[in-house]
Amino acid sequence: MNARRGEALETLSGVGPQLAKKLSRIGVHRVQDLLFHLPLRYQDRSRLVALGSARAGAQIMVVGQIDLSSVTFGRRRSLLIRISDGTGPLTVRLFHFSAAQRAALRQGRWMQCFGEVRPGPVTLEMVHPEYSVFDDRPPLPDVATLTPIYPTTEGVGQRLLRRLVAQALASPDCLPADWLPDSVRRELGFAALPDALAYVHNPPLDADQTALECGQHRTQQRLAFDELLAHHLALRRLKQRRLTHSAPTIVSSGELLKRLLATLGFTLTAAQQRVIAEVVADLQVPTPTLRLIQGDVGSGKTVVAAAAAVCAIEGGYQVALMAPTELLAEQHLRSFCVWLEPLDVNVVALTGTLRAGARREALAQIANGTVSVVVGTHALFQAGVEFKRLGLIIVDEQHRFGVDQRLALRDKGRTVSMSPHQITMTATPIPRSLAMTFYADLDVSSIDELPPGRQVVETVVLPETRRADILHRVSEACRAGHQAYWVCPLIDESDVLEVQAATDTSIALVEAFPNLQVGLVHGRLSAVQKDTTMQQFRDGDIDVLVATTVIEVGVDVTNASLMIIENAERLGLAQLHQLRGRVGRGSTHSCCVLMYRAPLSSHARRRLAVMRDTNDGFEIARHDLEQRGPGEVLGTRQTGLQQLRIADLVRDRALLPRIEAAATEMLARHPQRVEWLIARWISDSENYGNV
Ligand code: ADP
Ligand code: MG
């Protein structure tokens, strides 16, 4: 019955291959795409405005008789037509015109124009209005609806689009069916899909034009809901499919975990304990886990990873821990060695900078099973890495990895019949309703508590003209026995300049602080150099560490209590929050100075204010979402998903809490419709978000 919905545009009269090609430039490939190609704005062409009461700036419809028509050669050649209707004159100005147009627009005929009125040198003007010419005064406009204005492309005019849409709307075969269960539709007070579409393309004259132009009209929300639901269902389907795969059932006695916890020197927070229990339960299930662990900066995710690892190891499996940078991989390696070697668990590193011999040896140990934990960077999923019995993959700071890389890693551990369990950890939380909708293929845990005694990092925003005061602050902090980071982020889109800025700053600081040790780390140093410097900083042999954003994620040195961030106005909220998270990790009062160069844009000013006013990662994520939009915030994940066409996650967020229940109802009662709905909105739905 819906045979034609996905049908080629050529089935519409007047569309040939040429036009179809042009339409595809605006994302209109099928008849159905045309129906979901919604107007940007609307015009009211039902009212005729007397020329005498026309005001500059208004979009109006006018009718007048041509008094004068002449070509002028001013700065640009133009055709000027003076019309009047007895209440006043108006000049219509055309810069591009054909001989035929000129001939048609002759004195005595009538012109009906729609356009924006502007002030002109003699009379009010309209430049290139939409117009029609008549021999006699035309009848009053017979328009029953607002006139839609579509996003368009070269060679596809508004009239053409309107005509094609009208054709599609009028053909019952073309109209998409409503797959939303009636109960859901009634509960939400939504019109049926075909009615909503007809309304959005041709709203009645008394429609709420403001709501329509903001995309907040109920009928538009109906369409957005359809789309959001389709995406959510696609993710749920993905999860269902994952659950048909097998994973190792990993049971541990908890003995190794108990021994690990005994050596830590601190007690886990309740949130950490809860999340560890969730992971332990996951491992025992014979289907592959895909769990996202969200935890604010400093909430103690690493030890949760270690706990998960020992459980898998005790159950007889290997664990891969993947970090986004060499620096972080080194640090994890260190923590894991300290924690696990006393338990007789072998840990090995696999990073890009390993020498050939060491790498060969590591690979052999991974393959023969003598090492249980492999810590590494993206080098972990290069060819040649074969695990003996990989049972669990842990990905730290997931937002830094591309979808492809995660996929490659999962495939590493997969045998014909088994997929390893997978945990990803992120300090970039997203609001709960968004997580429920767009992480629907994952299980989500939150470490929603910081270890006790953590101090809020005091944040101050200062112009760089206050550099002298800032230097003083640094020397005071170091004199009191603390340490400081001085971060030099990207100045340009070039890491060469970033390195240059950090190098210059470190030279300046060496001069400014003759009694302090200043160190420098950046991405161009060798792994050994980086590592040596980080170790010196950790040991307290360096007081001030100048760094590029290589230290952005994960670095953990508890004695560091002061961070200076230069050019803070250039960084996004998520990145600032990550950077700031390098301090305030112990129990000393910590401070972060955001240095900026005036003048600030309004966005930058707001970002810095948010940072100054809150330390809460969720709160910051919410602002981030509002400022940058979800595409950016969801980052790499979104590249595995498709862009939304109609819905907007910020504008339509009120719909999100209803999506899950509607999806559950559809899955239970209308499984066939689920497939149809997904196919409607997602073109490559088979591979959708297959990560
Ligand atoms: P993040 O979640 O940002 O990755 P880390 O795992 O690096 O945080 O932990 C931050 C610091 O807090 C580390 O020094 C870690 O050893 C310490 N830590 C973790 N859990 C606790 C706890 N329950 N009590 C005290 N300190 C903890
Ligand atoms: Mg971390």
Image: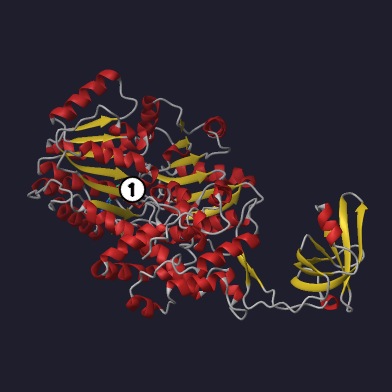
Residue 414 is situated, as x and y percent measured from the top left of the image, at 20, 39
Residue 421 is situated, as x and y percent measured from the top left of the image, at 20, 47
Front residue of 308 and 538: 308
Kindly give the residue lying farthest to the top in the view shown: 357
Q: How is the image coloured?
A: secondary structure
Amino acid beneath label 1: Asn
Residue 29 is situated, as x and y percent measured from the top left of the image, at 49, 53
Give the number of callouts. 1
- Residue at image position (69%, 74%) is 45
Q: For residue 294, what is the image quadrant? A: bottom left
User: Tag 1's secondary structure?
Assistant: helix
- Residue at image position (57%, 44%) is 567
From the viewer's perspective, is 452 left or right of 505? Answer: left
Indicate whether 523 appears above or below 14: above
From the viewer's perspective, is 676 left or right of 552? Answer: left
Kindly give the residue lying farthest to the left in the view shown: 253
Q: For residue 210, what is the image quadrant? A: bottom right
Kindly tell me whether residue 642 is visible in this rendering: yes
Look at mark 1 in the image and give the residue it sits on: 687
- Residue at image position (53%, 54%) is 460
Residue 118 is situated, as x and y percent measured from the top left of the image, at 81, 65
From the viewer's perspective, is 138 left or right of 319? Answer: right
Kindly tell me whether residue 443 is visible in this rendering: no
Locate the N terminus and report the quarter of the image it occupies.
Answer: bottom left
- Residue at image position (54%, 30%) is 496
Front residue of 101 and 376: 101
Indicate whether 27 appears above or below 218: above
Label 1 crowding class (10 Å Cα cut-off): few <14, some 14-19, many 20+? few
Front residue of 105 and 314: 105
From the viewer's perspective, is 528 left or right of 346? Answer: right
Q: Is mark 1 within 8 Å of ligand 2?
A: no
